[in-house]
Image (cartoon, rainbow, N blue to C red):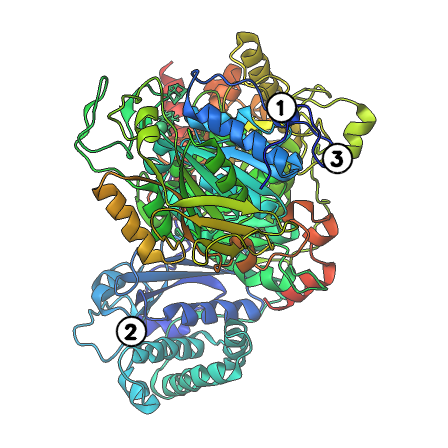
């Protein structure tokens, strides 16, 4: 049984005025060309609806291009608070002539199209409400020319949509004010066009479609923020002091946000000097080298990158693991292999980062799934890196990192800044002994001294070569095996230190679902839909690797556990199978990747297909 | 100029020469790298260096092993092949109160690490960067490196048909303010250059020809002991004078001695030899290196000096407290600061 999106049945336009209004439950897609400044307009719409108290989510589906290629901005308006992507949108803003045919074709029956009336050859559909608005008169009115006229066009659709959807102009004004950081002159010049378009629409368009936004009270305490901004703020409040990076979409805006906020948040109050440094390296290889150098010397060091950068970081990641140097690596995942789909989202770096490094390497990974967790894991990641003295990877993705998400404003981190086992000269003096790689506490984590420690026993030589407890070069088989066994013990310790899973247990569940990161929104919605058809599920959202007993126990409780993820090969599924080998056959992979954020529809259909296949198999047995 | 202390005598820190040694060397007997390590031990002892304040860093190679053989009381990091520069940059940004001596090889710097080498210099990270240049890959047994002589024939590698990379030229072009060439067989010059380099405010590059006795020591090789002893042509008699000491120049003929003051008040003395070489002119330095190459001269000494560029720590406007030692309160902004940021969304 397939599940339908919430799409109204087709109705002839003439019948529609009597139709029941559809309020706060639809999706809009805005089709424009890249580089025309439509981001300002789209964010203004998103934020205005959000400021009306209505739950929203915006997703920018953009090309790898600076100017000219098509861009689609999806806004989902959902009174129920569902924020996953929807496959179909009922409202289309067709403002890209190059894609207008394809865009109009993609509308469901009963859909609405707002298009630029200056164009000839706009295809009509008699099961779609078509509204035209001319852009030229507004451009002429503004006196702007050339490329700037694109900006006018953007504000024209904002004004027209505001009229059609019942969005008060005051809310658009507020939204633009946030966008332009209170610079009134910019707000005013944009609002002039918005207002003119609104008036034109009210005089020339007779609204016959049912879609409307009505004020609610579901967002008043919330803010909108991107995952990358949240991650940068999280890192700053987590005590990052050094960052090195090399530009790559979709991680660049994380460092941009560091560069925005560090200068005002992290200055020495007396001298005004910086208590941080951000270095743009010559490549990712150098970026991670700098991060390891800084981490070794005692700074709280991080980098942000995406798949291709992770590839270049492999050798240093192994060195960091083996020499035991703290480092935090944010991987804002995009679609690979190679350059792949650089502006699309995915979860394809799980296996690569978990084992990154040659020889026996195992890395700690955190999986934030919300902007709030991006903020929270800013502290968690830096703390874990220091406590475990190892590189810690944080796997976000393009959808989370670059799009705006609703959240409660971040609260001050409760988790203190933890520096782990660092010993001072005084500690060594009191103790009388020091050996860099000795497992004093039995948890696999040895004590480190920071360069500059003046005690005569403090200095040690970090190296990628085999070493004994004193960090002295050794090729002895016992030294090698002992050291690697200790690193394994340390990884066992990590299981209990990393954030545990979030579990939604359902006593009547037919099966379990495991996922991580941003797929959770599609899964939550899919679970509700499945529940309506009588299928009960339990859900475990993984927040880190390595896993602990809670994860094992969850798997053990269900005969079947679907592992849902945004990649082709079922990477987490494979890791879980090796981590829980005795339950490996219970784990069923539901993996999928086309570059787009996951939808509830895909999850429901995939689960139903898997379930019916199973029933069929059983009936044959 | 100090005449070199005797064994067992304590320096101002109460340490003897022995205290500045590292692990026993595992390099070949007679390897040029050993004598450079020994000169670093000697210099650190003579300069009363507190070992914990100096990092010893390296990449991978026989040369890059040598930090293990000096300053056993220093923190060290033997990093990845060709990647010492990035690690050094991070370490010295993490704690900009520390100094560093980095040791690399001609393969480590001239081949796999050429990019990082040039970017380190471009950023002007304050450290001494030593290239132990033997024109060959020692550790992987005799392949040509990027500094090998054109037309040279080696037993294992055959004939080298490519022109060499000149480490000093690369350094100057990248923006280095202290560029010197020396010969591991000229211990005194190595020491004096090392002392001056340690007092230079920026990246100081020492390209030291350091023969590989195992794979590239035939007299016909420009990186051999025989060739070096025969052909070394110092541009000047180089000396470094500490802050406190008076420089004796009165008995010199005017124009026979150049004296340059470094930022910390110490001096460099360049006693004129055959030619009147002025290391303060960049284009002249490059020209001199090129003519040396064309005429097959082995010039040594201070080739270029310019202390004007700010270091990476300077341009980053770092507070005095090293990033590594910021307290939790300095690392995490206040509750109010977060509330103010949240209000803007
Ligand atoms: C990524 C990587 N590639 C290759 C090697 C192998 N390797 C080790 S040392 C070396 C060359 C060292 O030559 P050089 O820097 O001139 O040092 P030398 O031994 O001559 O002092 C190579 C190629 C390595 N360690 N790492
Ligand atoms: S192989 Fe050459 S470079 Fe390596 S230790 Fe021996 S002499 Fe020195
Ligand atoms: Mg070499």
The residue under label 1 is A490
Q: Regarding mark 2 in the picture, which secondary structure is present there?
A: strand
The residue under label 3 is A424
Of residues A532 and A131, the one drawn nearer to the viewer in this rendering: A131
Of residues A440 and A402, the one drawn nearer to the viewer in this rendering: A440
The residue under label 2 is A115
Give yes or no for contact between labels 2 and 3 (Cβ–Cβ under 8 Å).
no
Give yes or no for contact between labels 2 and 1 (Cβ–Cβ under 8 Å).
no
C-alpha distance separating marks 2 and 3 = 68 Å
- Depth-wise, is mark 1 or mark 3 nearer the camera? 3
Q: Chain of mark 2?
A: A
Q: For disc 2, does the CB lie below 8 Å from ligand 1?
A: no
Give yes or no for contact between labels 1 and 3 (Cβ–Cβ under 8 Å).
no
User: Which image quarter has ligand 2?
Assistant: top left
Q: Earlier in the sequence, mark 1 or mark 3?
A: 3
Q: For disc 1, does the CB lie below 8 Å from ligand 1?
A: no
**Residue A471 percent location from the top left of the image:** 60, 22
Q: Chain of mark 3?
A: A
Category of crowding for the residue at label 2, using alpha-carbon neighbours closer than 10 angstroms: few (below 14), some (14–19), many (at least 20): many
* Quarter that holds the C terminus of chain A: top left
Q: Regarding mark 1 in the picture, which secondary structure is present there?
A: helix
* Quarter that holds the N terminus of chain A: top left
Category of crowding for the residue at label 1, using alpha-carbon neighbours closer than 10 angstroms: few (below 14), some (14–19), many (at least 20): many
């Amino acid at each position: 049984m397939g599940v339908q999106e919430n799409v109204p049945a087709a109705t002839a336009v003439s019948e529609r005025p009597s139709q029941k209004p559809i309020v706060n439950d639809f999706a809009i897609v805005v089709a424009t060309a890249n580089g025309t400044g439509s981001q300002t307009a789209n964010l203004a719409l998103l934020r205005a609806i959000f400021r009306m108290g209505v739950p929203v989510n915006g997703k920018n589906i953009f090309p790898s291009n600076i100017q000219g290629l098509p861009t689609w901005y999806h806004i989902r308006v959902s009174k129920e608070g569902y924020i996953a992507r929807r496959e179909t949108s009922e409202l289309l803003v067709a403002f890209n002539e190059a894609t207008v045919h394809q865009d109009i074709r993609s509308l469901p029956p009963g859909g609405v199209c707002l298009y630029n009336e200056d164009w000839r050859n706009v295809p009509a559909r008699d099961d779609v409400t078509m509204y035209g608005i001319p852009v030229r008169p507004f451009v002429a009115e503004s006196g702007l020319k050339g490329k700037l006229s694109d900006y006018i066009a953007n504000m024209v659709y904002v004004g027209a949509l505001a009229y059609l959807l019942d969005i008060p102009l005051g809310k658009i004004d507020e939204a633009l004010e946030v966008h332009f950081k209170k610079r009134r002159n910019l707000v005013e010049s944009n609002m002039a066009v918005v207002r003119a378009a609104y008036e034109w629409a009210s005089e020339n368009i007779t609204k016959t479609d049912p879609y409307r936004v009505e004020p609610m009270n579901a967002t008043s305490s919330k803010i909108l923020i991107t995952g990358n901004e949240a991650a940068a703020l999280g890192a700053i409040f987590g005590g990052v002091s050094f960052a090195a990076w090399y530009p790559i979409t979709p991680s660049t805006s994380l460092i941009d946000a560091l560069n925005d906020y560090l200068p005002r948040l992290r200055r020495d109050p007396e001298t005004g000097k910086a208590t941080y440094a951000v270095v743009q390296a010559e490549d990712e290889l150098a970026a991670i080298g700098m991060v390891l150098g800084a981490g070794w010397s005692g700074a709280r060091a991080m980098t942000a990158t995406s798949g291709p950068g992770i590839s270049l970081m492999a050798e240093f990641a192994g060195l960091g693991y083996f020499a035991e140097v703290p480092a935090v690596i944010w991987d804002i995942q995009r679609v690979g292999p190679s350059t792949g789909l650089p502006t699309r989202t995915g979860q394809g770096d799980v296996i690569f980062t978990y084992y990154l490094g040659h020889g026996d390497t195992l890395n700690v990974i955190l999986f934030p799934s919300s902007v709030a967790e991006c903020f929270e894991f800013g502290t968690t990641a830096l703390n874990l890196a220091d406590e475990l003295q190892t590189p810690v990877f944080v796997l976000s993705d393009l959808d989370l990192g670059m799009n705006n998400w609703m959240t409660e404003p971040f609260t001050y981190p409760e988790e203190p800044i933890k520096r782990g086992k660092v010993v001072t000269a005084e500690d060594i003096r009191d103790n009388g002994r020091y050996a860099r790689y000795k497992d004093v506490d039995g948890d696999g984590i040895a004590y480190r001294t920071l360069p500059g420690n003046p005690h005569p026993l403090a200095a040690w030589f970090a190296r990628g070569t085999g070493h004994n407890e004193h960090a002295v070069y050794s090729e002895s088989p016992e030294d090698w095996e002992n050291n690697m066994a200790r690193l394994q013990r340390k990884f066992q310790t990590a299981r209990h230190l990393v954030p545990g899973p979030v579990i939604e247990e359902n006593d009547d569940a037919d099966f379990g679902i495991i996922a991580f990161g941003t797929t959770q929104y599609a899964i939550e919605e899919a679970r509700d839909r499945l529940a309506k058809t009588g299928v009960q599920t339990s859900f475990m959202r993984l927040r880190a690797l390595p896993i602990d007993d809670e994860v094992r126990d969850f798997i053990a409780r269900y005969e079947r556990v679907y592992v849902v993820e945004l990649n082709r090969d079922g990477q987490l599924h494979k890791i879980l199978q090796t981590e829980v080998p005795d339950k490996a056959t219970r784990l069923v992979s539901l993996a999928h990747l086309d570059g787009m954020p996951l939808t509830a529809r895909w999850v429901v259909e995939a689960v139903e297909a898997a379930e019916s296949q199973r029933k069929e198999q059983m009936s044959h047995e | 100029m100090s005449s070199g202390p005797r064994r067992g005598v304590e320096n101002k820190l109460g340490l003897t020469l022995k205290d500045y040694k590292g692990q026993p060397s595992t390099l070949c007997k007679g390897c040029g790298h050993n004598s450079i390590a020994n000169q670093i031990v000697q210099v650190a002892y003579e300069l009363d260096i507190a070992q914990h304040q100096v990092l010893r860093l390296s990449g991978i190679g026989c040369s890059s092993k040598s930090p293990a053989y000096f300053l056993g009381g220093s923190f060290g990091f033997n990093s990845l092949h060709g990647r010492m520069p990035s690690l050094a940059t991070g370490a010295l940004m993490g704690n900009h109160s520390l100094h560093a001596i980095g040791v690399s090889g001609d393969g480590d710097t001239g081949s796999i690490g050429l990019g990082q080498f040039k970017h380190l210099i471009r950023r002007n990270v304050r450290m001494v960067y030593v290239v132990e240049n033997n024109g060959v890959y020692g550790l992987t047994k005799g392949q040509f490196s990027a500094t090998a002589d054109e037309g040279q024939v080696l037993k294992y590698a055959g004939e080298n048909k490519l022109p060499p990379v000149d480490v000093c030229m690369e350094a100057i072009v990248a923006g280095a303010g202290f560029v010197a060439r020396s010969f591991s067989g000229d211990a005194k010059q190595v020491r004096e250059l090392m002392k001056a380099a340690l007092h230079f405010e920026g990246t100081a590059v020492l390209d030291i020809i350091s023969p590989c006795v195992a794979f590239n020591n035939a007299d016909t090789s420009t990186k051999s002991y025989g060739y070096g002893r025969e052909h070394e042509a110092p541009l000047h008699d180089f000396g470094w004078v500490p802050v406190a000491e008076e420089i004796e120049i009165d008995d010199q003929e005017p124009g026979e001695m150049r004296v340059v003051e470094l930022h910390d008040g110490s001096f460099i003395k360049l006693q004129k030899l055959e030619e009147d070489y002025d290391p303060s002119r960049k284009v002249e330095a490059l020209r001199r290196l090129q003519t040396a190459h064309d005429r097959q001269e082995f010039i040594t000494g201070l080739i270029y000096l310019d202390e004007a560029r700010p270091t990476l720590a300077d341009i980053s406007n770092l507070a005095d407290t090293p990033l590594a030692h910021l307290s939790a309160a300095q690392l995490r902004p206040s509750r109010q600061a977060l509330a103010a940021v949240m209000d803007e969304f």
